[in-house]
Amino acid sequence: MTKTKKTPKQKFKTFLKILLIIIMIIAVLCGLLAVVSCVGLKLNGSFISSLSSVEYDNQLAPTLDENGYYTFVTDDDFKIMHLTDIHIGGGFLSIKKDNMALNAVAAMVKEEKPDLVVVTGDIAYPIPFQSGTFNNKKSAELFADLMEQLGVYWCLAFGNHDTEAYSYYSREEIAEVYEGEKYEHCLFQSGDENVDGVGNYIINIKNTGGEITQSLVMLDSHSYVDNDYLGIMWKYDTIHENQIEWYEQSLLELQEQNDSVMPKSLVFFHIALPEYRDAWYEYRDNEYEDTENVQYIYGKAGEHDIVVYSSEYNYGFFDKMLELGSTQGTFCGHDHLNNFSINYKGIRLTYGYSIDYLAYTGIMKYGLQRGCTMITVSPDGSFESKLENYYQDKYTPTNEKENVLMEDYYSDEEE
């Protein structure tokens, strides 16, 4: 029996049927994934809503002064919690890990009761094959909802993952979220639109005599350079020249307002300055002993290879800090396994503990690198910082802590 050969018209109809079936399958899958994502966001939203606010004996509340600076007034120590690389995915693949991150942050904030929380970037992590979404706004909103529910004042400097090239929302659009009326405790400011980046701004701490005891400078260290739009070649950006000019001009103006006394300052950004690498290499090459330029304070460099993944560009921000003599220390994130603090030429360069449960493969199983950094600013303007690991008994989260290995992330490779 011979087969009847299909005509071109019949072949085309068959092709259309197959194509339609494929489209229907894709549509159903997309619908299911959207439902799962919505359910996940609702579950994490319900978790946030279940939390009670932080109980302060006497919470400091900032005011917005006539020069546009949020200002805290106190004659006592000022307590800052530095968080970095929260990495909330906000999609169907990261529901559980997002909850872990929110759970950890809430536990530490409720225990430490900081006057201010500063996040040095990467609140969001909209990498689709790990989070299951391109929507970086959902991640931003989850974290902002958490902080508003806790009733804690906070601010941030943007990181490279907060607004990827393929993310739905730009830095300017995410900035609008943080500056919205819904988030009364968020002190983020977009800053001067004529200066590169989004979120170059200053928060001041004053005593009751009106003297600035500390200026907290937030800077956008941007994302990628040299056509590395997706960040797959690790070509990172840094603080630009006109930001350095803004930093200098802002501090000089504050000096005028401060009875001609240059205020002391701390600077917060995401991507480490090249000097972090210079300092660590000098310390390492001297067999981990202090040098004339470098004094080790605490912590470790846990990243492999070049250790500090900073930009190959350097526009002189560190030199400007030395010149002005205001900035005592800087705080950053980005390299999740680095948490060292090291004094370099008189300026203290510090990495914060990361939160990350999502970005590094299998990182949720490790705990040595997860926590917060507590910074205490004294009334005389001096400061101290201390690493606080999340897995200490003093932190009691709403949901049970996960079991983790208290060893280095790369320990298996080193054996």
Image (cartoon, rainbow, N blue to C red):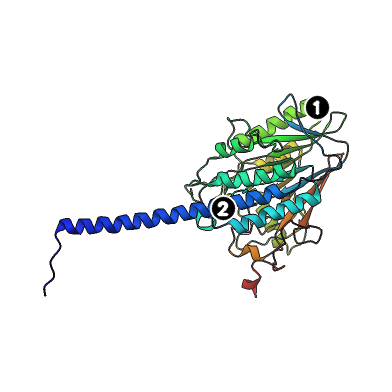
Q: Position of residue 184 (x, y in %)?
A: 70, 35
Task: Decide if residue 331 is on the left or right side of residue 60.
Answer: left
Residue under pointer 2: 39
Q: Nearer the viewer, mark 1 or mark 2?
A: 2
Marks 1,2: beta carbons within 8 A: no
- Picture quadrant of residue 61: top right
Point out which mark residue 309 bears.
Answer: none
- Picture quadrant of residue 407: bottom right
Instruction: Tell me the crowding category of disc 2: few under 14, some 14 to 19, or many 20 or more residues within 10 angstroms, Cα based.
Output: some
Task: Decide if residue 281 is on the left or right side of residue 235.
Answer: right
Frontmost residue, 3 versus 252:
3
Q: Vertically, is 292 above or below 171? A: below
Residue under pointer 1: 260
The amino acid pointed to by label 1 is Ser
The amino acid pointed to by label 2 is Val
Frontmost residue, 357 versus 313:
357
Q: Vertically, is 365 above or below 118? A: below
Which residue lies at the image location 54% right of the left edge and 50% below the top edge? Answer: 38
Q: Quadrant of the C terminus?
A: bottom right
Which residue lies at the image location 58% right of the left edge and 30% below the top edge? Answer: 193
Badge 1 or badge 2: first in the primary sequence? 2
**Label 1 to label 2: alpha-carbon separation:** 56 Å
- Picture quadrant of residue 12: bottom left
> Can the viewer see residue 127?
no
